[in-house]
Amino acid sequence: MKVNELINLLIAEVEASNYSGWDIFDGLNSKLFQKTPLYHSRIARLLWIQLFKISPINFRFLTMVPKGYNAKGLALLIRGYINMYKIFNKSEYLHKAYHLADIIISQRSKSRSYFCVGYNFHWEAKAFSVLPFTPNMIVSSFVAQAFLDLYEIDNKSCWLNYSLGIAHFIEKELLLDRRDNEICFGYIPDEPARVHNVNLMGSRLMARLFSITKKEEFRSYAKRAVNYSCNFQKQDGSWDYGEMAHHKWVDNFHTGFNLVAINEVQNFINTKKWMGNLKIGLDFHLKYHFQKDMTPKYFENKIYPIDIHNFSQGLETLFIFGYLDKAMLLLEKCIELMFDRNKHYFYYQQNKYFTNKNNYIRWGQSWMFYALSLLITTDKNNDLK
């Protein structure tokens, strides 16, 4: 099998679903659960959503969880289609990207005058409870990146304007901390949690907008946000997920997010200021988050669960930093452990005693499509095992 053959199998499966699917966190969309008194209990909601997240048995059909469009997943698919368009120059990829962009626009927050988007499910976490389509940093910034990809292809001002609307949302509702040399962006409005990959995703978007508009405020935001998170980087190169007491862990894919974001900020604002941070961060990541055969570990001291997110983000990280041989080994391990060769999709997780084969379009398929669209730029005919 070749990379282009694999990506064609995967995207055919995604297109057959009309880009609609389930998510690991969508359990609270259950129409059955919503009709019970338990839906009004925060503890019950937490337990319910965790059950759906970890169970290898998919209860969503039985409990009437509808499939839906996830804006972040669609944004990743857009970015993958744009990469494919750049390589093969087939207009069908661009048309598909426009179609997905229209779906995202239909999900915009109805309560804001500026453009911003959120997840299509009620999201219950330890720190907060968020209703469907409440705008947040992660979804909005990923959408902005996808729209800026479209802008770079067709130069239509609407895509830039949507992205500028998201930047306004971030500045107006997600700016938690402002100092002379540092700022920190938050996850969702009115929540104080400081999470480093969230902060750096905001920084990455601001830096890209600076590269397009040359507005100094964007460069300043980008630089100060990276300063903030780099000042929290540990001596060994790692980052805790966040600053709250229950956020003190160092995992694989969030580390990759941080590294890729900082690297992009450097490129967009033309600086080498954080090269030292990137070096020790990447050294830690490669040493502690991957085994010798490139099986990704979830934490630096724990292998399981083997998660498709660690493969997809690992592929992007290795590609961005030029470790192409390692990237191909990681992809081969991913196919070995996580790819269903009959149904042509990637599994969610492999635990020590069982494999969770649930098909999640945002968490698995959209991320892998985007990652494969990066790898295909290196060698469209690379043979895989």
Image (cartoon, grey):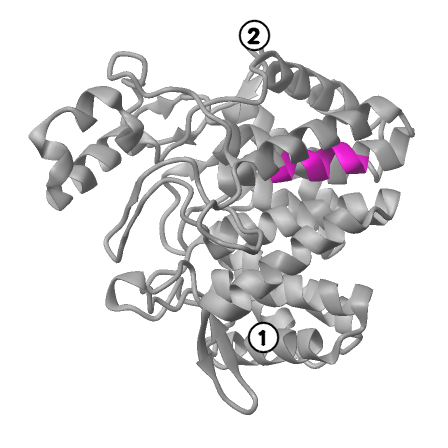
Look at 60% across and 68% down and name the residue there: 203
The image quadrant of residue 186 is bottom left
Q: CA distance from mark 1 to mark 2?
A: 43 Å
Q: Which residue is mark 2?
A: 342
Q: Residue furthest left?
A: 37
Q: Which residue is mark 1?
A: 226
> Callout 1: 10 Å neighbours few (<14), some, many (20+)?
many
Disc 1 or 2, which lies upstream in sequence?
Answer: 1
Badge count: 2
Q: Secondary structure at mark 2?
A: loop
The image quadrant of residue 75 is top right
Look at 86% across and 48% down and name the residue there: 155
Determine if the magenta segment contains residue 78: yes
Callout in the foreground (1, 2): 1
Q: Position of residue 305 (x, y in %)?
A: 37, 38
Q: Position of residue 315 (x, y in %)?
A: 64, 43
Q: Magenta segment, principal secondary structure?
A: helix
Q: Position of residue 256 (x, y in %)?
A: 56, 55
